Amino acid sequence: MQDDKRTIHDHWPRPRRLSALIGSALTAIAIHTTAIAEPEAKMLPDTVVSANRVALPSREVGSSVTVITGEEMQERQIRVVADALRNVPGVSVSRTGPRGLFTQVRIRGNEGNHTKVFIDGVEANDPSGDVEFDFAHLLAADIERVEVIRGPQSALWGSDAIGGVINVITKRGESGMHANGYLEAGSFDTYSGNAALRGAGKNYRYSASGSFLKTEGINMSRFGSEKDGYKNATLNISGAVDPTENLELSVNGMYVKNNVQSDPQPFPLGLIVDGDQERDGEQFYGRAQGKLKTFGGRWEHILGGNYTDTDFENTLDNTLSSANTGTKSRLDYQSNAFFSHAASATDHTLTAYAEYTYETFTNESAAFPTANQKQSNSSTSIAGEYLLALKQEYFLTGSLRYDDNDLFKNATTYRFTLAYQPLQTGTRVHSSFGTGVKNPGFFDLFGFIPGFFFGNENLNPESSIGGDIGIEQKFFQDRLVMDFTYFQSVLTDEIVPDPTFTTVINQTGESTRQGLEVSATATVTNNLNLIAAYTYTDAKDPDGRDEVRRPKNVASLALDYLFPSRKGNVNLNIQYNGPMEDNEFNFLTPNDRVDLPSFTLVTLASAYNINKSVQLFGRIENLLNQDYEEVWSAQSPGIGVFAGVRVNTDLN
């Protein structure tokens, strides 16, 4: 069930979402590598990893894709990945108040649990609850790049990819040995930092990184003065060895431990009130895989396994109220074959993929032992993809997937894409069309809170069909690149609360989403770069009402100025979120909706390099001191000032 349509937020055991990544990178048809694999040590800059089952140059990708680099996030001094996603066309973000509270990311007007997330090859969506990833806990310090692929992607990545896919790739070791890190302090008694050691040799690489964020925060409620703090500690480790020239063995793992303080939202008023509520969480995402290249690299074999584990304990007034545990294990195999035909000037890629997945869910209630749940589910999936490059101008793909599921009816999904870019021109046309599926989560099916909520075992999966078409144009010797994309999709069997808000049902009728995405990147001068985005989204329920927490208008502008001396930079980041509706959850009034006003977040950041190894930096967040709510009655932080130091050292 979509979190934005839930009843009182503290009564729901908000499961977290976990991520898995897909990774590898090389360009051109001659050198491909699979997108499901764990990433290579160094990725070529103009490569998209997760828009297809093999990595491709961006000009060959028919889907709408935005790539955020770790360098961009460092220049903007972004500490949590969700804040970077606000700059992506087609994306809207809703955080339930201060730092650390539940954070949803929606793509093209779809639900938050319609976004599939990968972290280094591991599916990160939480197997408990409604299988949604909570972006509140994904720190940015150790991220190399984030890819956002918009539109139905279930033919490639299975359930949950109705709105799109977000692929997170962490940093990898490079030649030699390197150590780096930063420390920062600022408003709201906030401290954050990171330390990393990375390196690589002829046939190995390694990376170890630790990050933390601690803040006393602000009061989440409109009432009272008790502050709601947050703590996050993240450890990320990866490594790879090449026993032979054609074989790579790799492993990666991320562990996140967090504590979130919040306030309750008691029935029946719906308003968040000052109180003592906490959630302790632990998440682990791990993957091991082997990749073998045969026939001179023209035939690849990738065998791997993922494991996701999420644990949460909820307390109210220092008393345990409930606990959630979810696990997801996956074994997968992918085979890629590459071949060319000189006479027809065509290049071909054939991919076959198979996976087996097993999930478990445990829900424990301290006050109501009868609400305890232990459930499991398994599925087997097979998929195939064909890529055709014709005269290096036309690029077509077709994908087909079949999912055999124990709990739900089986699903067949498909996707087609087209990219056309005549050589020596600045124009590129891209288009995609496909279907998506979203299976109900464990809590929607079996959840039980006596006297308040009970699951519905008769739920059907949600399904969608949609597509987009866009044109990208370059101007002024490629100094300005603009893209205009129109998108449309239809969702059926949407899972929503019933009229009593005590269970969930499949809604009759169709929910529609359509809109326009506009993006621009410009090199204004040799020292000034600009990135801008605008999205218009019209998302409707079957009854014709706007979907909640779906602003019609979202825009962003990022300006980065590099000092002529190359000793530092200044970055201005402006993010606009238009008016939107939210559920009121006040059962004593006739209204079920409330209007949330628009807001504009402005961040000004600057950095100065003392020398090659030491950098001083500082920023001001919410420069306009906006008083805003992204979720009804949940307060957000005002203006904040932060400063710190960064150190980079070569240990060769």
Image (cartoon, rainbow, N blue to C red):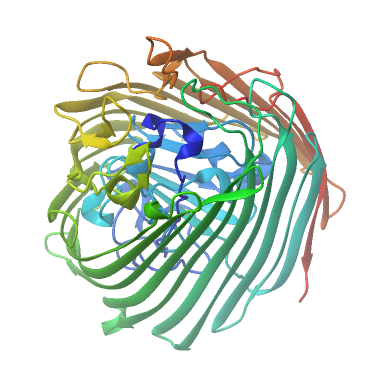
Residue 109 in the figure: left or right of residue 341: right
Relative horizontal placement of residue 206, taking residue 417 as reference (left or right): right
Q: Position of residue 182 (x, y in %)?
A: 77, 54
The residue positioned 49% from the left and 76% from the top of the image is: 251
Q: Decide: is 336 above or below 525.
A: below
Rendering quarter of residue 496: top left
**The N terminus - image quarter:** top left
Q: Which residue is drawn at 30% across and 45% down?
A: 444
Taking the spot 82% from the left edge, 58% from the top edge, the residue there is 613
Residue lying farthest bottom?
243
Image coordinates for residue 482, horizontal then vertical, percent: 41, 29
Which quarter of the image is occupied by the C terminus?
Answer: bottom right
Residue 563 visible within the image? no
Residue 210: quarter of image: bottom right
Estimate the x, y position of residue 259 in percent, counting from the top left: 64, 50
The residue lying toward the viewer, choosing from 76 and 225, is 225
- Inspect this view and state whether residue 34 appears: yes
Q: Is residue 325 left or right of residue 496?
A: right
Q: Which of 464 and 562 is in front in this view?
A: 464
207 over 491 or under it: above or below: below
Q: Which residue is rendered at x = 19% and y = 38% of the image?
A: 464
